[in-house]
Structures are given as C-alpha cells and as structure tokens.
C-alpha cells in the first residue's frame, strides 16, 4: 500500500489497524505482524525489520550468500543453528517452525530500541532471558500468547544447547535453561459425532466442499490437518478390491496405508475427478494453506452453531478416542496415528 505517496510492500490496512502480511510462498516461515491502529516511526521501524528478514530469507532460498551478521550476535547463532545438521535432518515442517520462532525472537524489539538478534549471544544471562520472555509473551496488541512464547523460548534453548558443543570456546551459559516455564496442559477437546455431522452438512450447504472433505479426512483417517491438506488424489488406490490411501506424515515422515470408509469415499466423489489436489479453496481456486483452512473451518463451525472450543485439529484426537472406545489395540492405534511410542 501507499502512504503519503510512498509504497510499502506487504503492508495492508484493515479496520482493526495496520498489518505486515507476508507474501505467498513465505507464509510457512513468516507470520502476519500487527502494528496497531497507527503507523508511526516505531511501527515503520518494525516494518523494515520484517522486510529485511524477508529479503535475507529470499536470498537464502535462491542459494546465494546472504550478508553475514557479525559472528558474535544472536542473529549469527540462529543462522548457524538453522544450517546445522541438528536442524536440517528434521522434517521440513519442523525446520520451518524453528525458523519462524527464531526469526520472531531475533526481530523482537527490546526496550532500548535494539533488536534481540543484534545482541552478543555469549554475554546473555538468565535475567536477560527472563526479561525477554516478559516482553515477548504479549503480542503487538498486548494480548497474552503464553503457549507461542514458551515454544519460541524452547527453540532458543535448543540453539544455545547446540552452541554448547559447536561454539564451545564462546559458550558460557544457556540463558534459556531453568526458566521455570510450565508446559501447557495437553489439549483434550473432542468433537461429538453429532457435531461432526453438523459441520460437514453445513460445509456442503455453504458450498465449501473442500472444508467438509478436510473434516472427513481428519475424522475418518485420524490424521493431522497439515497431512489432510496435502493429500493428492493419486494417494488413493484399490487394495484387494477396497479403496485405501497412502499417507506420508509431514511431521514424522512415517508412511501409513489406511482403509477408506464409505463416508470418505462418498466425499471424494464430490471433488472433480481431474483435480490432483483434493483440498482447493473455493474462493481462490488454489490449494489451501494451513492457516487458510483453519480459518475457513472456523467460519463453518460458527455458521453451524457448534461450540467455539472445538477446532478442526481436534478431529484427529476425536477419531483416536473413538477407536480406543471401540476396542482398538495399541498396535492398531499406532497403525493409524503413526506414533512410535505406545505411551504417546
């Protein structure tokens, strides 16, 4: 958008205020940043920090050499950690999540106006991490985000743990250790069978076949939303006369072969046979991204009058719970969820 004749790429304005909106292709790494109702010097400085991070990421994606930060800064530590085998050998989704968390921390403005990423990493103490958390736990609108903040702190702690060996001479202390942050309680929310039926019926009524199919995929197969979103028609095939689907889980890279229920088969028939991607936004004609699908599902849930507590991601837990109540063994549950540990 333009302000006073000057163009600001990726800056948008909504009734709720100004936002930095990452361009398509980078949204798995960067998230939307809210600036509030005004766009003054402070907001402009934060805007340029986001643009700088985006430019650095684009250079890295093209395989070029990005301008190196001074080797003693947090920016350099995070850069080297993300390029280490400790990270690069994890699933792509995990790498993107780590990069998103560390970018948010590095770009976070401190009370003296500097960035956290510009600090000398080996000089940071416990009190610095505690002070950072007290600031970072609130978003741009001063709304608390404890779960997200704890997650980012955990990734930073891993980066310093890596530095304990990789940067042995400079390492003095891990400021993110022993922060006393309580882990969030495990989410236990589940759908009722009637709510699932209400949801998929309302999705079809609203013409959002992909959203209804996404719910059916998660509920009938017990898979994560991210895996349902990526499913292709080519993954479905007849095995011994019955339709089955091969799922390669994005988080664990585990490959599963799952039977397809009659309900799911009926919903597959609602999608054009020549469409390779199953979950395509009816509004844009493009495959859904995670956040887009969750947002569309929330709209359907509200229109159907279903409780606000449930999310489309809870359908996986609902499926596994119902399988357990129906008498499925541990091995049978593992064959659906892809977990390697019986305790989980």
Image: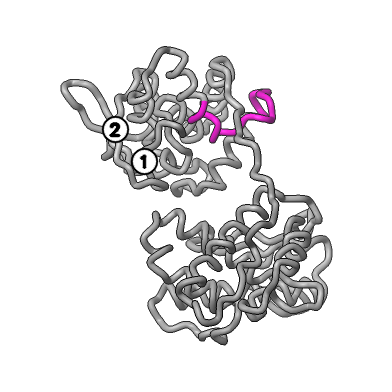
- Looking at the rendering, the stretch of residues picked out in magenta corresponds to 302-317
Residue pictured at 41% horizontal, 57% vertical: 92
Left or right placement of residue 17 versus residue 68 in this view: right
At horizontal 71% and vertical 79% (from top left) the residue drawn is 6
Q: Quadrant of residue 106?
A: bottom right
x then y, percent, for residue 178: 66, 57
Q: Residue 343: x and y, percent?
A: 45, 32
Label of residue 171 in the image: none
Residue wearing tag 2: 245
Q: Nearer the viewer, residue 237 or 126?
A: 126
Q: Is residue 287 above or below residue 228?
A: below
**Residues at discs 2 and 1 in contact (Cβ within 8 Å):** yes
Tell me the residue at 43%/71% (across/down).
83
- Identify the residue position indicated by label 1 in the image: 231
Q: Magenta segment: does it hold 109?
A: no
Does residue 304 show up magenta in the picture? yes
Chief SS of the magenta region: loop
């Amino acid at each position: 958008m333009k302000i006073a004749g000057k163009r600001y790429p990726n800056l948008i304005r909504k009734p709720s205020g100004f936002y930095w909106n990452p361009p398509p292709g980078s949204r798995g790494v960067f998230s939307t940043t809210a600036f509030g109702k005004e766009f003054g010097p402070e907001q402009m400085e934060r805007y340029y920090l986001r643009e700088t991070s985006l430019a650095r990421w684009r250079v890295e994606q093209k395989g070029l050499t990005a301008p190196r930060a001074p080797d003693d800064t947090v920016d350099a530590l995070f850069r080297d950690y993300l390029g280490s085998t400790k990270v690069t050998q994890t699933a792509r989704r995990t790498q993107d999540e780590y990069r998103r968390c560390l970018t948010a921390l590095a770009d976070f403005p401190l009370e003296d106006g500097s960035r956290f990423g510009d600090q000398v990493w080996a000089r940071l103490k416990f009190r610095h991490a505690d002070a950072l958390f007290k600031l970072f736990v609130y978003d741009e609108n001063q709304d608390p985000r404890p779960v997200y903040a704890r997650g980012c702190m955990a990734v930073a702690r891993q980066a310093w743990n890596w530095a304990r060996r990789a940067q042995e001479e400079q390492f003095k202390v891990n400021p993110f250790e022993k922060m006393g942050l309580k882990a969030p309680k495990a989410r236990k929310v589940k759908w009722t069978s009637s709510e699932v039926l209400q949801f998929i019926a309302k999705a079809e009524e609203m013409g959002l076949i992909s959203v209804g199919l996404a719910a059916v995929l998660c509920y009938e197969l017990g898979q994560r939303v991210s895996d349902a979103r990526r499913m292709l028609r080519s993954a479905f095939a007849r095995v011994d006369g019955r339709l089955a689907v091969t799922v390669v889980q994005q988080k664990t890279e585990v490959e599963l072969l799952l039977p397809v229920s009659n309900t799911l088969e009926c919903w597959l028939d609602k999608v054009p046979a020549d469409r390779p991607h199953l979950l395509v936004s009816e509004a844009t004609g493009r495959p859904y991204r995670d956040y887009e699908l969750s947002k569309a599902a929330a709209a359907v849930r509200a229109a159907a009058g279903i409780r606000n507590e449930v999310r489309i991601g809870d359908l996986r837990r609902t499926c596994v719970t119902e399988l357990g109540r129906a008498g499925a063994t541990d091995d049978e549950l593992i064959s659906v969820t892809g977990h390697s540990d019986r305790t989980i």
